[in-house]
Image: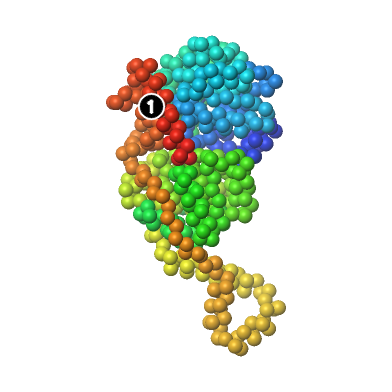
Amino acid sequence: MTTFNALGISKPIMKALEKMGFEEATPIQEQTIPLGLQGKDVIGQAQTGTGKTAAFGIPMIEKIDQDLKKIQGLIVAPTRELAIQVSEEIHRLGKFKGVRTLPVYGGQHMERQIRALKDGPHIVVATPGRLLDHLRRKTINVSGVHTAVLDEADEMLNMGFIDDIRDILKAIPEQRQTLLFSATMPKEIRDIAATLMKKPEEVKVKSKEMTVSNIDQSFVEVQERQKFDTLTNLLDIHAPELAIIFGRTKKRVDEVTEGLSARGFRAEGIHGDLTQGKRMSVLNKFKSGRIEILVATDVAARGLDISGVTHVYNLDIPQDPESYVHRIGRTGRAGKTGEAISFITPREMPHLHLIEKVTKSKVKRMQAPSFDEARRGQQQLTVEKLTSTIEKKELQDYRETATELLDQYDSVTVVAAALKLMTKERRNTPVTLSSVQPVSVKRTGGNNKGGGNKKFRGGGDNNRGFSRKGKPSRNRKFQNKRGSNNNNNNNNNRKQNQ
């Protein structure tokens, strides 16, 4: 892996990256950022969760003149959720350079957006429909745009926005840099690259390039109600130096964190509701070893690069194989080995097989340990500490007291007392987690090549702007109205789940 420092990034952005907890560039960032900084057009083929936002955001921010109060960068994203997410990350990346970012999407009050656009943001992140509305009303000035980004272009194609994308690109100055990102490259996306981009360089990142070979992958088949006890038993046996536990929802993260603390573990959680300051405080504690366990949602943990993580626990299996690869990649860094353990309910076994197929890796079955096995595991750690102390042979000052003890008690009793004193006896406080729905293959689809099935994500935004048969709606008025309603619902769902 390449560090961001090696890519020639300016000090304000490096400061932002450090504050965000990003240290090493992902493959898509490593390949795209140098091309972007050279002003070249780029076609990037990469899935969600590979670090695309920083890949296109950093070159864009580097070129922004913060003294010029006009739109210089434009990012088009398929959904309001992605637009908000990208806008927030661009804001964090450009914070110390003074770059102002504005998300523009349907469902917001138009007059409020018009006022915000008049304030002169440097970068606008917009959904296609609302951006076209502003272009037609002449309430957005894109004459100063020098960098344009199309994010998740195949998703915009699936949602019926391909003509809108062409119209948007034609409205921007021809002397611009264009970066296009898409998980798949259907003909229509290739046509845009051929007709509206200038000799684009291609960057392609496959999931297998992100799979880390030195990670021992296992799963334990367990009922939902037994997950937490199984987790704490495994933590006692493994005794990880630093561990990350992934949960699917913010509520899940909060409940697991509280439960672990109740049982005597040093754990804290991060998710989308935390302020940036609180998030950084938790990450700093984790990096310095003041807490041993970090509980996180996918979104909160995206881009984390913390050395020394020995174990990753997927308390809830992720919705898609790309997220699985991203999660387990938090361990096994810098040539070290790591362990990744996933908790699979019986109904989720087909989904695990799908992950194995897509990631081309075998996940070994392990038995759920009992409480007695966990207790013996804790005792074994104490034995190892005692053995290590004995081997150091620095006991001369303690021998006289030890001899006195052995005059009063037999050796087995003395050693047993030492083990009891040194062993961390876990509080067996009852903990009950709220249930989460199991992931099923039916929800996520079976074709990892993409197309219209949302790349295994399942649920959520799949059907926005679609007719009952899954084809883009031809009635644009109906589509936009329906998309707006779905946006509201999905935004609420996304807030709950991240």
Residue 373 in view of the camera: yes
Q: Quadrant of the N terminus?
A: top right
The type of colouring in the image is rainbow
**Residue 120 placed where, x, y %?**
63, 19
Q: Which amino acid does label 1 sit on?
A: Arg
Foreground pick, 490 / 243: 490
In this view, 437 is above or below 465: below
| Quarter assignment of residue 30 | top right
Q: Left or right: where does residue 346 sit relative to residue 67?
A: left
Residue 171 in view of the camera: no
Kindly give the residue lying farthest to the left in the view shown: 469
Residue at image position (53%, 57%) is 261
**Residue 192 placed where, x, y %?**
46, 17
Residue at image position (57%, 76%) is 418
Foreground pick, 403 / 127: 127
**Residue 386 placed where, x, y %?**
59, 72
SS under mark 1:
loop
In this view, 224 is above or below 22: below
Foreground pick, 379 / 285: 285
Pointer 1 local density, CA inside 10 Å: few below 14, some 14–19, many at least 20: many
**Count of all numbered marks drawn on residues in the image:** 1
**Residue 453 placed where, x, y %?**
36, 31
In this view, 65 is above or below 429: above
The residue that mark 1 highlights is 464
Q: Left or right: where does residue 466 sit relative to residue 115?
A: left
Residue at image position (67%, 36%) is 15
Residue at image position (51%, 60%) is 263
| Quarter assignment of residue 25 | top right
